[in-house]
Image (tube, rainbow, N blue to C red):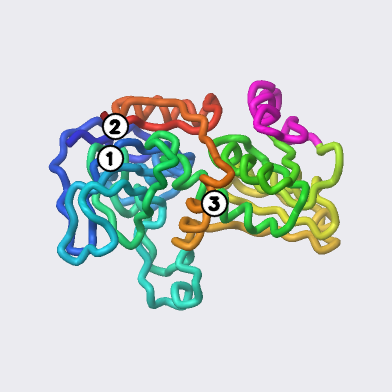
Amino acid sequence: MRAMILETPRQPLRLADLPVPKPNPQQVLIHIHACAVCRTDLHIVDGELTQPKLPLIPGHQIVGTVEAIGERVEKFQVGDRVGVPWLGHSCAHCRYCLSGRENLCDYAQFTGYNLDGGYAEYTVADESFCFSISSDYPDLQAAPLLCGGLIGYRAYRMTGDAEKIGFYGFGSAAHILIQLARYQERQIFAFTRSGDTQGQEFARQLGATWAGDSDALPPEPLDAAIIFAPIGKLVPAALRAVAKGGIVVCAGIHMSDIPSFPYEILWEERVLRSVANLTRQDGEEFLALAPKVPIRTEVNLFPLSQANEALEAIRCGKIEGSAVLVIE
């Protein structure tokens, strides 16, 4: 099979010919149709997430069909269409797994980081960590839901019943979650990098109440904010933008250092928290909800061999919506 592999962080991925993997007794072999490209992939390639297995096939927003199954597989059959997310394994016995927080599992393994992922023609995955994909979604539309959608949904839920929510960074996750927010009759205030008028117009087209630069204050105090961009200086900015009792959620797996800030912008019971990974329950809930909205993803297509170009486009902020690798 063809695959794009990371051999050394901070170096381009290399196109290679590799053997098709064989599933173990609890795995399915998936013929990949599409794999969305995530900013987390960029953090891995750029060496900001420091413990990947090497060499590594990145990618954790995988859609494909089951081509073979291990002898203990019960959930799927050959021919089923499935999705594979970031969380690829949890131990089921640590205190986090036993309390419904498998996203914090001490022994978790992640697709495209500890486990080979979807920048390839085939992959294997534990059947317990795969999702059925609704027929409402073509492959290319479904792929971005598997991280931008799922982890974005977990961050969105952390805002509770907030009516006015700021999205700092308007990329793949934000363009998905604004559709859910509008469906639930909430107002979204979109913050982009300074001067990104095209991104701000994209947010308004999707129903944002207001869109502006990330260093600006919104026209009215927010009930909550989600920081999708991996930029630590946005934390004080978001705290200043939320009202008393407001919630600021950091949704990324990596962020640059947060600068010091005065206690007064945290005071008055404002809450600052992070979101880590996802649970399978998050996935089941969101993938059942998405067709009801219905959520539609804006996709920018790249062939597998242009994975480096897709990553660079994300690095430079040139993607509206989601980048998706098409596996022919």
Name the residue at 33% across, 30% down: 326
Residue type marked 1? Ile
Which region of the structure is painted magenta? 193-216
Q: Estimate the spatial distance between the alpha carbons at disc 1 and disc 3, rounded to whole Å.
A: 24 Å
Residue ID for mark 2: 327
The mark nearer the N terminus, 1 or 3, is 1
Q: Is residue 233 visible?
A: no
Q: Is residue 74 above or below residue 147?
A: below
Q: Are marks 2 and 1 in contact (CB under 8 Å)?
A: yes
The crowding category of the residue bearing disc 2, from other C-alpha atoms within 10 Å (few below 14, some 14 to 19, many at least 20), is: many
The mark nearer the N terminus, 2 or 1, is 1
Q: Position of residue 87 (x, y in %)?
A: 40, 57
The mark nearer the N terminus, 2 or 3, is 3
Residue type marked 2? Ile
Q: Estimate the spatial distance between the alpha carbons at disc 2 and disc 3, rounded to whole Å.
A: 27 Å
Q: Position of residue 223 (x, y in %)?
A: 79, 52
Q: Nearer the viewer, mark 1 or mark 3?
A: 3
Q: Position of residue 56 (x, y in %)?
A: 28, 45
Q: Which mark is residue 289?
A: 3
Q: Secondary structure at mark 3?
A: helix
Q: Is residue 54 visible?
A: yes
Relative to residue 205, is residue 210 drawn left or right? right
Q: Which mark is residue 32?
A: 1
Snapshot quadrant of residue 89: bottom left
Q: Position of residue 255 (x, y in %)?
A: 57, 47
Q: Secondary structure at mark 1?
A: strand
Residue type marked 3? Leu
Q: Which image quarter is the C terminus in?
A: top left
Name the residue at 40% across, 34% down: 140
Task: Say how many tags the image has.
Answer: 3
Q: Which image quarter is the N terminus in?
A: top left
Q: Are marks 1 and 3 in contact (CB under 8 Å)?
A: no
